[in-house]
Image (tube, grey):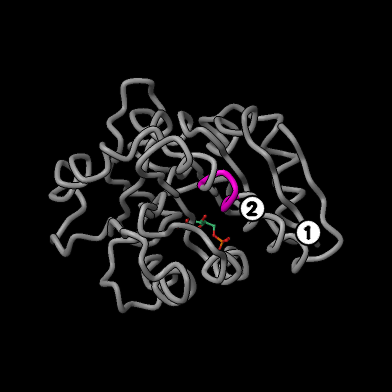
Amino acid sequence: MEFIEYPDREMLSLSLADRLASELGQSLRVNDRASLCLPGGTTPVPVLETLSGTDLDWDRVTVFLGDERWVDGNHTRSNSRLLHRHLLKDKAAGAQYIDLYTGDARPEEAQDKLIAALKPHFPITATMLGMGNDMHTASLFPDAAQLKDAMGSEAPLVMPIHAEGAGEPRITLTRPALENSMNIHLLIMGPEKRETLERAVKLDPMQAPIRAFLDNATVHWAE
Ligand SMILES: O=C1O[C@H](COP(=O)(O)O)[C@@H](O)[C@H](O)[C@H]1O
């Protein structure tokens, strides 16, 4: 694990957005398309804003979330709403976006469709992960009934998740889908998340799902 500490959040956002754009740009030099997997929640807003103003051949980039809460795209808890507001505009408006929320009543009904839509974009060129203070990443929650399956090497690319800690039903990319990414970045901000990460490093991925990705990740942190 590489850990980068930035003097402030603005420096972090500029540097991480630049790094993601550079990884996508390098891939586009030798491939027709590149893919970018992003977290929801609250932390990524400044990175997404910076990225949306970055020069890149966005028409050849496919963007999707690492997880989605099973709520309509206009709901305040929708991760998709976050991407529409903060990334999919300005220079990044031309990116192809695969919405994990299909409008089906339950995430179980969307699983096969999403696997078919996402599969051509694997392995992912660049993945940015977030982390909750319960050590979940994407929607791989420690208390999810489906965690063992979602963390297994045979897991499908996406799985529905039901966990008390999650609030609503979710859909998530699984461990094999995420860990095969060509570049993995973990974005965390503030002292509490840093402490959480320090605890997670010493735990098993079944207790601390973020642990599964740390060995190959670059962690970006600012106070
Ligand atoms: O529920 C979620 O939480 C995590 C962390 O969110 P944050 O608000 O603490 O940054 C996020 O990475 C994930 O995508 C989201 O669905």
Instruction: Depth check: give the residue in front, 170 or 85.
Output: 85
Relative vertical location of residue 70 with respect to residue 49 in this rendering, above or below: above
Question: Which mark is drawn over residue 187?
Answer: 2
Q: Where residue 16 appears, x then y in whole percent?
A: 66, 54
| Quadrant (top left, top right, bottom left, bottom right) of the C terminus | bottom right
Q: Residue at x 49, y 73 (%)?
A: 86
Relative vertical location of residue 60 with respect to residue 91 in this rendering, above or below: above
Which residue of the protein is positioned furthest toward the front in this rendering?
29
**Side (left or right) of 69 relative to 2:** left
Which residue of the protein is positioned furthest toward the right in this rendering?
7
Question: Which mark is drawn over residue 32?
Answer: none
Q: Where residue 127 appears, x then y in whole percent?
A: 50, 44
Q: Which residue is mark 1?
A: 222
Q: Residue at x 51, y 30 (%)?
A: 206
Which residue of the protein is positioned furthest toward the top in this rendering?
153
The magenta-colored residue range is: 20-24
Magenta: main secondary structure:
helix
Q: Residue at x 74, y 60 (%)?
A: 12
**Side (left or right) of 120 relative to 180:** left
| Residue neighbourhood size for the residue with mark 1, other residues' Cα within 10 Å, grouped as few (<14), some (14–19), many (≥20) | some
Instruction: Depth check: give the residue in front, 78 or 95.
Output: 95
- Residue 9 in magenta? no
Asked if disc 2 is less than 8 Å from ligand 1, the answer is yes
| Residue neighbourhood size for the residue with mark 2, other residues' Cα within 10 Å, grouped as few (<14), some (14–19), many (≥20) | many
- Residue 22 in magenta? yes
Residue type, label 1: Ala
Kind of element beneath mark 2 = strand
Of labels 1 and 2, earlier in sequence is 2
Separation of residues labelled 1 and 2 (CA atoms): 9 Å
Residue type, label 2: Leu
Q: Where residue 177 appears, x then y in whole percent?
A: 38, 33
